Each structure stands twice: as structure tokens, then as C-alpha cells.
């Protein structure tokens, strides 16, 4: 069994909710995957329980923005959560410096070719992201 965690900043909550809706069909089709509801880094940090109990094998989809990358780099427990994943997949919400060390997503292939906020074609970017995450999960399983 594989668990998928979507990590994001509350600042991008509207995009994450839309992404969750686009994932609805995939969440019901892939049987050996548990989908956790999206986790917001500000909530994890504020609760002083930054690292929830993680499943044996898990995937992290990092919804990358300046705020998210900043929290990720400033909070060692968040980095540990991401680095402990079997698969780390970046989903670029807004332009940020995610593809440089020490960001754990450095060198990873993003779900979509362009940042979500840099286009008016949000649905096209979401569909591309869902298609890519399907490929990642199916190839892993």
C-alpha cells in the first residue's frame, strides 16, 4: 500500500482544492493507493506536530511556491518528511527557486511543464499534472 501526501502553503489553498477535484477520478481508480487530504505547512508548523506518523511507503507531491519552499528550507522536520518519501514529485504553483540545492525537489521532473499561476489555462495544467501523477504511481506499483 502506498500513501500520497500533497504538501502546500495555505496561500495557494484555492489551487490545491482545484487540484484535489481534478484528482477525483484518479483517487478512485488506483486501488493500492491511499490519498491523504492535502496538508498545509503552516498548519503543521503551528501545531508543533510537524511530522505526522508516516505510512511505510509514501509519495509527496510538493506544491511549490516561494512560501512553501521557504517553510521547507526553514523547518528541518518538513525537509525530513519530504526526504523520507519513496517518491518526491514537484508541482510548480508559482515561480520559485525549487530546483537548486538544498531543496529536496532539486532535479526532479515536475508534474506540469509550467507554473500554474503563469498561465490562464489552469485546467490544462491540472490535467497534465494528473496524467503525470498517474504515470508515476502506475510505474511504481
Image: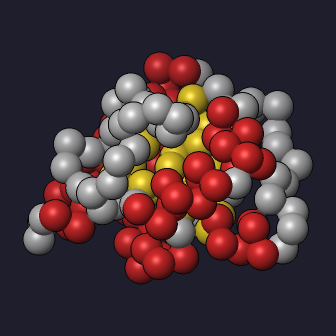
x then y, percent, for residue 109: 34, 30
Q: Is residue 31 above or below residue 86?
A: below
Say if residue 23 shows up in the picture: no
Q: Is residue 111 left or right of residue 104?
A: left
Q: Quadrant of residue 110?
A: top left
Q: Quadrant of residue 75?
A: bottom right
x then y, percent, for residue 121: 12, 66
Residue name at image x 75 percent, y 67 percent: 45
Q: Quadrant of the N terminus?
A: top right
x then y, percent, for residue 13: 48, 77
Q: Looking at the image, which is closer to me, 96 or 51? A: 96
Residue name at image x 64 percent, y 65 percent: 41
Residue name at image x 27 percent, y 57 percent: 95
Q: Is residue 79 above or below residue 48?
A: above
Q: Quadrant of the C terminus?
A: top right
Q: Is residue 44 above or below residue 52?
A: below
The colour scheme is secondary structure
Q: Looking at the image, which is closer to me, 126 or 24? A: 126
x then y, percent, for residue 74: 64, 55
Residue name at image x 62 percent, y 68 percent: 40
Amino acid at each position: 500500500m502506498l500513501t500520497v501526501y500533497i504538501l502546500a502553503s495555505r496561500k495557494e489553498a484555492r489551487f490545491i482544492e482545484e487540484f484535489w477535484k481534478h484528482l477525483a477520478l484518479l483517487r478512485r481508480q488506483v486501488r493500492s493507493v491511499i490519498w491523504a487530504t492535502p496538508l498545509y505547512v503552516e498548519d503543521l508548523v503551528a501545531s508543533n506536530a510537524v511530522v505526522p506518523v508516516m505510512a511505510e511507503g509514501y509519495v509527496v507531491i510538493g506544491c511549490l511556491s516561494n512560501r512553501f519552499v521557504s517553510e521547507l528550507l526553514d523547518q528541518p522536520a518538513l525537509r525530513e518528511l519530504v526526504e523520507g518519501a519513496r517518491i518526491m514529485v514537484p508541482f510548480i504553483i508559482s515561480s520559485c527557486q525549487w530546483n537548486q540545492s538544498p531543496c529536496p525537489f532539486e532535479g526532479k521532473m515536475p508534474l506540469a511543464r509550467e507554473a500554474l499561476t503563469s498561465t490562464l489555462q489552469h485546467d490544462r495544467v491540472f490535467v497534465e499534472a494528473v496524467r503525470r501523477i498517474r504515470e508515476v504511481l502506475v510505474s511504481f506499483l
